[in-house]
Structure formats: structure tokens, C-alpha cells
Image (cartoon, grey):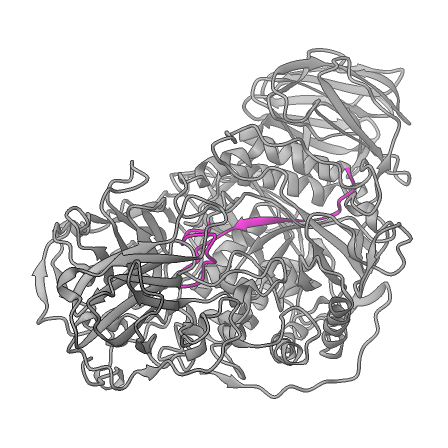
């Protein structure tokens, strides 16, 4: 149901550099389970954000709830992010997703932001909210609501009409955010973005930004406010910055974005991204140096490249992008950011998801996989292991939040450069060696000199230290590790924790590379090699205990005595260390090894309850400070024994998933029915709206004397729209020109007197495609007669432009813009045409409020409910798919299939078309995909690149009956029929998050439009 809003204002709140907050990062998950939580403080300085006086490194990943229309799967993604080392999640909120028409807002079902923010707190993640009003995000209109495109006022300015609309949205969304702020103990929101990438700084834009700030504060938002600067231009910087050329703005913290790795294209191959930039301590400085624009606030990359988006007609770059922005890129680029003191980093995207229905902006197709840490099917890519290691390292090593540049360190090889920082308080040293330049390749050995409070060393003392290819190492020296002291290590530290009487440290390195670690003791300790090939020696003069080894399978070393608490030192290869998971509980940290995923750990009396996933039969080993002796895995008891390493080892492997095979849709019975009755000359359009608007606020206005045809002006904003025009024939009128706006890969089809004339499509294969164009057709000789004729036109609107440049580009015309019917030569006038228009049923008063605006298109079959489960299709023709027939216009195919995914399993499934080895098909047809009534994407066979479409569980019933409906729009030429359709299984795991089915209203006969001719 929509909610009619009433805008109001409260008195404005003021914020200094100290505000109230809730909890510390390590204890956030535990606090989420507490009935009441006390209020605490957020503060900040030039180095970091602090929560309750404790410096906190924000390690964030972006995910969009609107790109995953299955709320129970939000928890799945959030748990995977938390397990993968993130401590924060960033959310865009899409204004248009919640508001089908002005004054109506919906935060229920798949739009339940209160549930989303509650989940984030329960999982133990801080939250960065980015509610707009403008967000971009490669979403239609950049997140503006559809009804805003007809507004005369210029968006993203202080125009009163626009501000009133923005206030309407902010009143609604801020009421939700306010309840979930970390500052008052109600949630985990720590930062609030008031605008995104606004790079105009005229007086009207300055007043606009101040208005947003004041409105947000008046609505009770007390956490720090920021704006995301597009490309580090020193725009909207806090007022205390004295840096020349910056533009001050009403924000508390300056933030910027950057995508130096980019995506993949013809000139960008995997493993060769750009040079890692310095946007902090090592920057060239000034207004455009990144963090240097605001010396008094912590360095904040609000968006840093975690991948890149793909576009219509590309060569399917997401797999390449996942590699290009993979582990090597992460260690080099994110490591460079850490070296530059960027203690607030948010990676865009960490889960891209699906731009289902009519959500995608013209620049993208359905999949928004992004090459992200979690792929579109919710699988952890191998780059998630690197993120986990970096995230666990950041969480463990608190001196990273207050590092400064230290003395220059020069590697013995000119091919290698080394960042060197120090924490003045703890005297911890931090080193990041990588190639010089960072995108160089090679396998280079090097040494470097270490000078710390522990003495002078040349690293390594034995063996070699090398950088191979695109890679970096993040090394520590003079570091207090729990109750131990690390002199240095050429291995990387993943995490450390205290296990009552014993400390534990986990180190790793590249496979088979040499490693060297030195610890400091007051007297010779007792060393016991429990597992692995590790050599040790003790220097009594310095008190140095040195270990030398290869990074291979897991080595375990037990150290006791020497004036320190016992230590379990575990050393392995990079891949071995990635099998470890860590959670926080009120009884202390828990470390596990073995399963594909450990989601959570909870102490219940004398029981340690673990939840997670297995992809195969898996060992389970646990280290915990808790005294709990019993262990359960997903609720089932696990018998364990205590090992010499102090761990609990499962006596039997955890079971892997059962096999599951999806049904074969080629063997299914399909039902078939023609659509496009609007093309027939006898079709009754008497109930359609006449195109009689006298003017339009569209950027693309019709020529003088022509009617306003823009679909938005008649309340139709999404999907297909039909026009029917009548004219009196003229034997000389042989040329029909139609100016239309169809968005990315937009489509126009034309009939005259029921005869298909042809179709036109906007060009593709560009990351910024044309979104309007002119189609020209020759009228067949047989139709150039006197008397009345009917033109029928269908335009597929593949979304409105974003407003990235604040130029009202979202107001570009959609549907028909103008039409002329005239002689090709000789005559200067056009034949007058009287037009009517029909779009999605109800226009802005959408028929299906449960699925929302993204699901409501304008095909006849959609208005009649042919896409819905329960529609009575028994009188339709029975066919098999693939189907070689092709008709101009649209035809529907429907089938049902049963799924029987084993209980306690999570199977990720999708729908595939044609030959997956080919990026495109020869035939010209496109398919709107409906699963249980939900519009889950658009396949364009001859444009591509997407052939497989992820269908999230919840929309899909994994243990029940499902309805698949396909609206196939073709040019009618041979070879343009529907290819084979298949169910594809991406993965199956034993485990998963609890699943609740999404509401999928079924067909009800009396609810459908039964107007004449329909």
C-alpha cells in the first residue's frame, strides 16, 4: 500500500565534531542481540573516525537492496560480507523505487528499509546511508521518481518545486534512518550522504546543498554528514579547510570517489589496471589531491572501484572485470589506500545484484554483477578471500588508524617501491612493497633495511623476498601483538586473538615463497613445531626468536616461556589462510577453519553454536576463548576433541550438499499466445488518452504545431507504450519519420493498417549509448491511398537517463517525440495525424503495488495478467521451445516447473537462452522474463551480452511450483524465433540463510483490465 505523506519540519540540530553513538566495531554484533544499548559518541579528526573514543577503520562494501528483491537474501549477502572482513555496509536508497506517484510512498515488502537496517545491525555491520535525493547508481533517472521528469523546476537546485519534492522524500526516509542511528542506541548507521557527485557550485547549488543539510538535521539525523565528490575536485569540503581552490559546503567530513582500475574493454586485459594512485599521505596535495582537500577530516573514499559496470552490446566483461579487479589489484590498490591513511574506504560494488524489471539506466543491462566480491548469484569470488584477509588485518591492527609518513625506505631493486608509515604512539611500523610503477610485471627479488625501536635489520636475513606480477605485501614491524612483540615478518598478518592463557597469530604468504618472522623475548623460549617445516633460531643478544619457512600447507608452532604468555603461531600459504573465518562474541573471538563459509558464532550456555555453508564434505577446527565445550553446526551437534594446538577438531567431516538437478525446460509443455492486438486497424482505442497536452517540460520538445507525444506527460514512465494515429491518406505521402526516445537499446515497431512496416533500435556497443533517434520508413505503395489510415507504434523505453551532470538529462523525451508523414521530395508539409496513447495500466496509479513501479510495463499481455502465476492459459496453443516461428510484434510463452531443492540447502538458479558460448544470436528478438509474476530481466538476442539471468530465491520457490512467462518481441524475420530456454544452476550449498518467499500476487480475473478490444 502507498502511504500518503505530510511534510513537516522540526527545529534544526547543530553538529560539532562530536556526536552521540552506540557501540565499538568489535562488539557491534554482540550489542545487536541486547535488548537495550546505551548511547555513545562518534568523533573524528584528521586521521580517523572514532567510536566511543576508539579509533575505527571503516572497511565498507556497497550493496543495493533494490537490486535484490528478496528481503531474506539481504541477510545472506550481509552475513557473507561480514564473514569476508567488512565491518560496514553502504546502502543507496532509490527514491523512485519507493514512490510511484507524488505523495505516495511504500516501504513494505521488497522495499522495507526498516527491516534492512535492522538486519545490518543484527549481522554486526555499521551502515553508511546514501538516500539521495539523487544517487546515480546506473539506475533509471539516477534514482529520481518517475513523476519528477515532468516537473518544470530544474532538479538538484534550490528551485522551490524541486525542493518541495525532495523534502517529501527526505521526510519519509529520514524517519526510518533516524530510528537506526548509532548515535542513539537504536541501530548502526554511522554516516549520512546528502548528495552524490554534484559538481556544479553556482549560488543555486550552494543554497540547495545547505537546504539538504538543514532538512536532514531537522529530521533528527545526528551522525556525520558527507557528500561524495566526483573524481576528487575539492568540492563540498568542510568550512575549516584552508586549502586554496576548494569549495566549502555544509558537510562534516569530506569524501571522494575513484575508479582507477576501471573495467574491461578492448584495450584493458585482465591483470593490467592503471597505476595505483596516491590520494592521501603520499598525494601531491591541494584541492584535487583527494584527502588533502580537507586536512582536518579523516581521509574518506566513499566509492573506490570494486569493479565496473557493463553495457548493452558489450562482450560480457564482468568475468574479466572480476579478474582485473581481483586479488592482485586489491592488494596493490587497497594497500596503497591504507598506506595513504584512507581510514574510511567503501568499495563499489561488493555485491552488485540485478537491475530487474525497468530499473536499469540506459547505460546498463539487467545484470549489475560488477565483477564484485560477491557475484550476482551471491557466490563468494576468490577475491573475497583477499578482502577477508585485508579486513581481518585492519580489524586487528589498530595503529593503522593513526599512521603518518615515515623515513623513506629504498628497496635493493629499482623495480620495487616501498611505502613506509609509523604510528608515533605505539611505534608500529608499516611497509607496503610493490612494483614501481604498480602496474609493472615481473618477478623481482629484493631486500630492504629496517630501522625501528627494536634495532636495525636487513630483510630478509635468510631466503628471498619478492614481488611477482601485480601484487603487494602489507608488512608490520615493531608491533605489539596481543601479549607478544613482533620485531618484523616478511609474511603478512591476517589476524591475532587471545585464547585465555594463550595468544594466537595467523600469518600467510604467496604459495612456496620464503617467509621470515622474528619475535622478541627476554629469555630463550620453548619452541615446539607441531606441524610443518619451520626452522627456528634464537639470538640471545637481541632476544630475537627467528623463524624461517616456506608458505605452503599450514604450519603450527607452539611457543612458551621467554617472559611472555604462550603463543600459537600458524603460518600458511595465502589460499590456506583464506580457509579461516573469525567472529566476535561476548565471550571473545572465535576462529574457525574448514567450511566454505562460517556465517556466525554464538555462545549459548555451554554450547558454541556455529552457522555456515559447505560446498563439499569439510573439516571443522575451532579456536575460542570461550569455555564452551559443546559445538553445533547449523543446529546439529558436532563431536569434537581437543588438539595439541588447543583447538577443537570435529571428529567427523561436516556433510556437503546433496545433488540437485533442475528440471529440463526443453521437455516442458509450453503455452503460446499472440499479443500486439493494438497493431490491428479494428482495435478499439476509444478508451485511450488523446495526446492533447499543450506543452511539455521534456528536454526534447516536438516541432511547432506537433502534439506532445512524450509518454511521461501522460503518466506512463516504464516499459512499453503504444500509440495509435489516424490520418487521411495522400498518395504522395511516402515517407514516415519518427523521432523517438527508447533509452539504452531502445526499440520502435511500426504498423500501418495492420501491416508491419519495420522496426528501429538505438545503437549499442557503447558505454554511453544514444537514447533517442529518428527512424525513417518508406510507406508501401499499397497503403498510399485516400481515406483514413491507422498507424500503430510500439516504443520500448529502456529507461530514462541519469542526471549525473545535473543538467536535467532525466527529462529527455521517451516514447514518441514527433512524427512526420510526407513526401520524400517535393512537398514541404506533413500529413496531420491524430494520436492516442496507452501505456502500463493505471499509469502512475500502478496496478501492482506489491511488485512496484519496476514491474509495471505496457504490453497488452501485462495489462491482462498473462505474466502472473495462476493465469488461466488452458485455451492457449501448446508448443515446444525452442520455437522457430517468428511473428512481428510480441508473442507470449508460459510454462510451469516444480523445484525440489533439498531442505537445508541454498541453490542459486537462473534462466538461460540460446547458446551460452556465443555473445549474440543472429535472430532479432528480445524477451521480457517473468518469474511468478516478477519481471526479472530483458534478454536481447542479437545485442547481448547477457544470456543467463539470475532469479533470486524468494521470487523463485525452491521447493514448490513456479510459473515462467516470456514476452517475446520479434522483427518477424526467419531465425528470429525463441531459442532454447533452460534452468541454470550456479551453485548449491548445504546451509544458507533462512528463506521467506516474497509475496507474489496471482491472477484474479476481476482485477484485470477488460476494456473494449482488450
Query: At 54% from the left edge and 60% from the top edge, which residue is drawn?
Result: 802
Q: Position of residue 82 (x, y in %)?
A: 58, 51
Query: At 53% from the left edge and 67% from the top edge, which residue is drawn?
Result: 699
Viewport quadrant of the C terminus: bottom left
**Of residues 237 and 814, the one drawn nearer to the viewer in this rendering:** 814
In the rendered image, the vertical position of residue 191 relative to residue 412, given as above or below? below
Q: Position of residue 305 (x, y in %)?
A: 60, 44
Say if residue 463 shows up in the picture: yes
Q: Position of residue 360 (x, y in %)?
A: 45, 58
Q: Position of residue 256 (x, y in %)?
A: 71, 51
In the rendered image, the vertical position of residue 739 relative to residue 913, given as above or below? below
Say if residue 606 shows up in the picture: no
**Of residues 362 and 667, the one drawn nearer to the viewer in this rendering:** 362
**Of residues 307 and 265, the one drawn nearer to the viewer in this rendering:** 265
Viewport quadrant of the N terminus: bottom left
Query: At 41% from the left edge and 82% from the top edge, which residue is drawn?
Result: 845
The image quarter containing residue 671 is: bottom left
Left or right for 406, reference 501? right
- The reply to whether the magenta stretch includes residue 108 is no
The image quarter containing residue 886 is: bottom left
Give the magenta-colored segment's residue range.
Answer: 340-368
**Of residues 1003 and 230, the one drawn nearer to the viewer in this rendering:** 230
- The reply to whether the magenta stretch includes residue 357 is yes
Task: Determine the main secondary structure of the stretch shown in magenta.
Answer: loop
Amino acid at each position: 500500500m502507498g502511504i500518503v505523506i505530510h511534510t513537516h519540519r522540526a527545529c534544526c540540530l547543530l553538529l560539532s565534531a562530536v556526536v552521540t553513538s552506540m557501540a565499538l566495531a568489535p562488539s557491534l554484533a554482540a550489542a545487536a542481540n541486547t535488548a537495550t544499548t546505551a548511547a555513545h559518541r562518534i568523533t573524528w579528526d584528521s586521521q580517523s573516525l572514532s567510536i566511543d573514543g576508539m579509533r575505527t577503520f571503516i572497511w565498507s562494501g556497497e550493496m543495493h537492496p533494490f537490486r535484490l528483491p528478496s528481503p531474506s537474501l539481504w541477510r545472506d549477502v550481509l552475513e557473507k560480507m561480514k564473514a569476508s572482513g567488512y565491518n560496514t555496509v553502504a546502502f543507496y536508497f532509490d527514491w523512485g523505487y519507493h514512490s510511484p506517484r507524488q505523495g505516495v510512498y511504500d516501504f513494505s515488502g521488497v522495499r522495507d528499509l526498516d527491516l534492512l537496517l535492522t538486519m545490518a545491525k543484527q549481522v554486526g555491520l555499521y551502515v553508511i546511508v546514501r538516500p539521495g535525493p539523487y544517487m546515480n547508481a546506473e539506475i533509471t533517472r539516477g534514482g529520481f521518481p518517475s513523476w519528477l521528469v515532468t516537473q518544470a523546476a530544474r532538479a538538484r537546485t534550490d528551485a522551490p518545486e524541486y525542493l518541495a519534492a525532495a523534502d517529501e522524500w527526505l521526510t519519509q526516509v529520514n524517519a526510518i534512518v533516524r530510528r537506526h542511528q548509532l548515535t542513539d542506541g537504536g541501530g548502526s548507521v554511522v554516516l549520512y550522504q546528502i548528495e552524490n557527485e554534484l559538481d556544479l557550485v553556482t549560488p543555486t547549488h550552494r543554497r540547495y546543498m545547505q537546504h539538504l543539510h538543514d532538512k536532514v538535521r531537522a529530521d533528527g539525523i545526528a551522525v556525520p554528514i558527507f557528500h561524495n565528490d566526483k573524481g576528487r575536485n575539492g568540492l563540498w569540503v568542510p568550512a575549516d579547510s584552508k586549502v586554496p581552490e576548494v569549495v566549502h559546503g555544509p558537510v562534516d567530513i569530506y569524501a571522494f570517489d575513484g575508479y582507477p582500475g576501471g573495467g574491461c574493454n578492448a584495450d584493458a586485459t585482465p591483470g593490467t589496471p592503471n597505476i595505483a594512485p596516491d590520494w592521501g599521505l603520499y598525494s601531491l596535495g591541494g584541492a584535487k589531491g583527494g584527502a588533502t582537500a580537507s586536512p582536518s577530516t579523516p581521509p574518506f573514499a566513499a566509492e573506490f572501484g570494486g569493479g565496473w559496470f557493463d553495457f548493452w552490446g558489450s562482450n560480457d566483461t564482468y568475468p574479466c572485470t572480476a579478474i582485473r579487479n581481483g586479488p592482485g589489484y586489491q592488494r596493490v590498490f587497497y594497500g596503497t589506500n591504507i598506506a595513504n591513511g584512507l581510514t574510511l574506504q567503501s568499495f563499489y560494488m561488493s555485491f552488485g545484484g540485478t537491475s530487474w524489471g525497468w530499473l536499469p539506466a540506459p547505460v546498463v543491462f539487467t545484470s549489475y554483477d560488477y565483477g564484485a566480491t560477491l557475484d550476482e548469484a551471491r557466490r563468494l569470488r576468490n577475491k573475497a578471500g583477499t578482502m577477508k584477509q585485508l579486513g581481518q588485518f585492519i580489524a586487528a591492527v589498530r595503529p593503522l588508524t593513526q599512521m603518518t609518513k615515515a623515513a623513506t625506505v629504498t628497496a635493493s631493486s629499482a623495480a620495487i617501491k616501498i611505502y613506509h608509515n609509523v604510528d608515533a604512539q605505539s611505534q608500529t611500523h608499516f611497509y607496503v612493497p610493490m612494483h614501481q610503477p604498480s602496474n609493472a610485471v615481473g618477478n623481482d627479488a629484493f631486500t630492504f633495511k629496517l630501522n625501528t625501536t627494536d634495532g636495525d635489520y636487513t630483510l630478509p636475513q635468510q631466503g628471498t623476498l619478492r614481488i611477482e606480477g601485480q601484487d603487494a605485501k602489507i608488512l608490520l614491524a615493531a608491533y605489539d601483538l596481543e601479549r607478544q612483540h613482533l620485531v618484523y615478518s616478511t609474511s603478512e598478518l591476517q589476524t591475532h586473538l587471545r585464547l585465555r592463557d594463550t595468544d594466537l597469530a595467523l600469518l600467510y604468504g604467496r604459495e612456496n615463497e620464503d617467509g621470515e618472522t622474528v619475535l622478541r623475548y627476554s629469555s630463550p623460549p620453548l619452541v615446539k613445531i607441531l606441524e610443518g617445516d619451520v626452522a627456528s633460531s634464537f639470538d640471545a643478544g637481541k632476544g630475537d626468536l627467528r623463524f624461517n619457512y616456506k608458505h605452503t600447507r599450514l604450519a603450527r608452532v607452539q611457543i612458551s616461556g621467554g617472559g611472555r604468555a604462550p603463543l600459537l603461531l600458524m603460518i600458511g600459504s595465502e589460499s590456506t589462510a583464506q580457509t579461516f573465518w573469525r567472529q566476535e562474541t561476548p565471550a571473545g573471538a572465535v576462529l574457525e577453519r574448514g567450511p566454505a563459509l562460517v556465517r556466525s558464532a554464538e555462545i549459548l550456555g555451554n554450547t558454541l553454536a556455529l552457522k555456515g555453508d559447505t560446498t563439499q564434505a569439510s573439516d571443522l577446527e575451532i579456536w575460542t576463548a570461550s569455555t564452551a565445550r559443546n559445538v553445533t553446526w547449523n543446529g546439529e551437534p558436532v563431536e569434537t576433541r581437543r588438539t595439541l594446538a588447543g583447538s577443537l577438531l570435529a571428529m567427523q567431516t561436516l556433510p556437503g550438499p546433496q545433488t540437485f538437478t533442475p528440471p529440463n525446460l526443453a521437455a516442458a509443455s509450453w503455452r503460446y499466445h499472440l499479443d500486439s492486438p493494438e497493431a490491428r486497424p479494428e482495435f478499439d482505442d476509444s478508451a485511450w488518452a488523446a495526446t492533447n497536452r499543450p506543452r511539455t517540460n521534456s528536454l526534447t520538445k516536438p516541432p511547432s504545431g506537433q502534439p506532445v507525444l512524450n509518454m511521461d506527460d501522460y503518466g506512463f514512465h516504464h516499459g512499453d507504450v503504444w500509440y495509435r494515429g489516424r490520418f487521411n491518406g495522400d498518395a504522395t505521402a511516402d515517407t514516415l519519420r519518427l523521432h523517438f526516445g527508447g533509452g539504452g537499446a531502445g526499440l520502435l515497431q511500426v504498423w500501418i493498417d495492420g501491416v508491419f512496416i519495420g522496426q528501429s533500435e538505438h545503437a549499442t556497443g557503447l558505454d554511453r549509448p544514444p537514447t533517442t533517434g529518428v527512424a525513417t520508413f518508406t510507406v508501401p505503395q499499397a497503403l498510399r491511398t485516400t481515406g483514413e489510415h491507422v498507424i500503430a507504434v510500439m516504443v520500448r523505453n529502456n529507461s530514462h537517463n541519469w542526471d549525473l551532470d545535473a543538467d536535467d538529462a532525466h527529462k529527455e523525451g521517451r516514447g514518441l517525440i514527433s512524427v512526420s508523414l510526407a513526401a520524400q521530395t517535393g512537398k514541404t508539409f506533413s500529413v496531420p495525424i491524430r494520436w492516442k496513447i496507452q501505456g502500463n495500466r493505471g499509469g502512475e496509479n500502478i496496478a501492482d503495488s506489491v511488485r512496484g513501479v519496476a514491474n509495471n510495463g505496457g504490453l497488452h499481455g501485462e495489462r491482462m495478467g498473462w505474466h502472473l502465476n495462476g493465469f488461466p492459459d488452458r485455451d492457449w496453443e501448446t508448443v515446444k521451445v525452442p520455437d522457430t516461428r517468428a511473428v512481428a510484434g510480441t508473442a507470449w510463452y508460459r510454462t510451469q516447473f516444480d523445484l525440489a531443492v533439498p531442505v537445508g540447502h541454498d541453490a542459486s538458479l537462473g534462466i538461460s537462452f540460446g547458446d551460452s558460448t556465443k555473445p549474440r544470436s543472429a535472430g532479432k528478438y528480445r524477451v521480457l522474463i517473468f518469474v511468478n509474476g516478477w519481471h526479472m530481466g530483458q534478454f536481447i538476442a542479437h545485442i547481448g551480452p547477457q544470456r543467463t539471468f539470475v532469479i533470486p530465491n524468494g521470487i523463485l520457490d525452491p521447493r514448490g511450483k513456479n510459473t515462467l512467462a516470456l514476452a517475446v518481441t520479434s522483427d518477424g524475420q526467419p531465425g528470429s524465433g525463441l531459442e532454447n530456454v533452460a534452468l541454470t544452476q550456479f551453485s548449491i550449498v548445504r546451509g544458507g540463510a533462512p528463506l521467506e518467499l516474497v509475496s507474489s500476487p496471482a491472477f484474479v480475473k476481476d482485477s484485470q483490465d477488460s476494456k473494449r478490444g482488450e
